[in-house]
């Protein structure tokens, strides 16, 4: 059976081959599975074999999360202090002047990552205990921008190359499910739930969702985030 390392590297290589054909709207592409591979690999090795049978599935990297650290929803402080990961972070081949990669030295928080890993810690305690129950994965590994540096999420892409990208990501998710022996996928937001249902059709796996922690979400911001935390902790507590 392939390892998480092997299927992640395979996805990374396939995405690199596809990147030049992603279309005119995609002017810049960062692949954290390349330039942040050292930390991503450490995350897979440290936490991918602790028994978690539930996958928390995100959409794609955020500029100040996985884009800096190589870890899904990887707010720098959570990656360093909660997950205990370290290592060298390189640079994308082409770097947009408005989208720097500072790596683990960044002092800017990624709100979605702070919230998600925060509620995971609040629910389970240590990172080892958390990963005995769950594992966090992004559906698409690529961070994409238009010419002005605006973040482009996968749902904003169109055309044959976009279809091929999602097919690569679907295959990777299927492989991760098989490697982990996962019994449940929880989409972090509606898009991730939809992609999981499409990718895993015909597989005996439960697919649900939790609300996304994005600061653009009214629920995630309501009552200082307390309503979002309560909703998500209720789901996680039942794992």
Image (cartoon, rainbow, N blue to C red):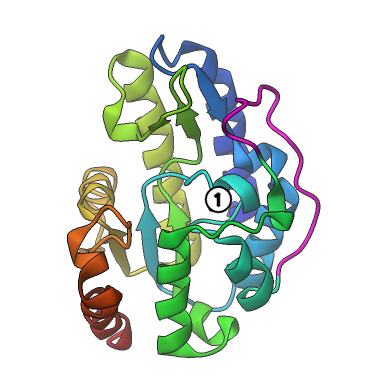
Q: Residue at x 24, y 85 (%)?
A: 234
Q: Position of residue 124 (x, y in %)?
A: 45, 88
| Viewer can see residue 210 | no
Q: Is residue 47 left or right of residue 38?
A: left
Tell me the crowding category of disc 1: few under 14, some 14 to 19, or many 20 or more residues within 10 angstroms, Cα based.
many
Please determine whether, in this image, residue 114 is positioned above or below residue 22. Answer: below
Q: Quadrant of the C terminus?
A: bottom left
Residue 95 colored magenta? Answer: yes
Residue closest to the eye, 187 or 62: 62
Q: Position of residue 129 (x, y in %)?
A: 53, 87
Secondary structure of the residue carrying numbered label 1: helix
Q: Which secondary structure is most common in the magenta stretch?
A: loop
- Which picture quadrant has residue 161? top left
Q: Is residue 197 left or right of residue 10?
A: left
Residue 235 colored magenta? Answer: no
Please determine whether, in this image, residue 10 is positioned above or below residue 186. Answer: above
Residue holding disc 1: 66
Instruction: Read off the magenta span.
Output: 85-100
Q: Quadrant of the N terminus?
A: bottom right
Q: Is residue 79 left or right of residue 35?
A: left
Q: Position of residue 219 (x, y in %)?
A: 19, 66
Please determine whether, in this image, residue 144 is positioned above or below residue 234. Answer: above
Q: Residue at x 20, y 71 (%)?
A: 222
| Viewer can see residue 101 | yes
């Amino acid at each position: 059976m392939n390892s998480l390392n092997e299927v992640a590297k395979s996805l990374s290589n396939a995405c690199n081959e596809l990147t030049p054909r992603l279309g005119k709207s995609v002017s810049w592409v960062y692949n954290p599975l390349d330039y942040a591979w050292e930390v991503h690999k450490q995350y897979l090795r440290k936490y991918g074999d602790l028994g978690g049978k539930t996958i928390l599935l995100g959409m794609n990297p955020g500029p100040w999360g996985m884009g800096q650290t190589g870890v899904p929803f990887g707010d720098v402080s959570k990656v360093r202090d909660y997950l205990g990961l370290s290592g060298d972070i390189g640079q994308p081949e082409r770097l947009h002047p408005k989208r720097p990669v500072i790596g683990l030295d960044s002092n800017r928080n990624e709100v979605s990552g702070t919230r998600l890993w925060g509620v995971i810690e609040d629910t389970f305690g240590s990172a080892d205990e958390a990963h005995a129950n769950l594992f966090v994965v992004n559906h698409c590994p690529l961070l994409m921008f238009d010419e002005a540096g605006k973040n482009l999420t996968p749902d904003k892409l169109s055309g044959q190359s976009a279809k091929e990208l999602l097919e690569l990501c679907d295959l990777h998710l299927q492989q991760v499910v098989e490697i982990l022996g996962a019994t449940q996928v929880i989409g972090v937001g509606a898009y991730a739930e939809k992609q999981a249902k499409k990718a895993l059709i015909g597989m005996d796996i439960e697919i649900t969702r939790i609300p996304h922690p994005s600061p653009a979400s009214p629920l995630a911001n309501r009552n200082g985030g307390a309503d979002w935390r309560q909703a998500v902790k209720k789901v996680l507590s039942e794992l």
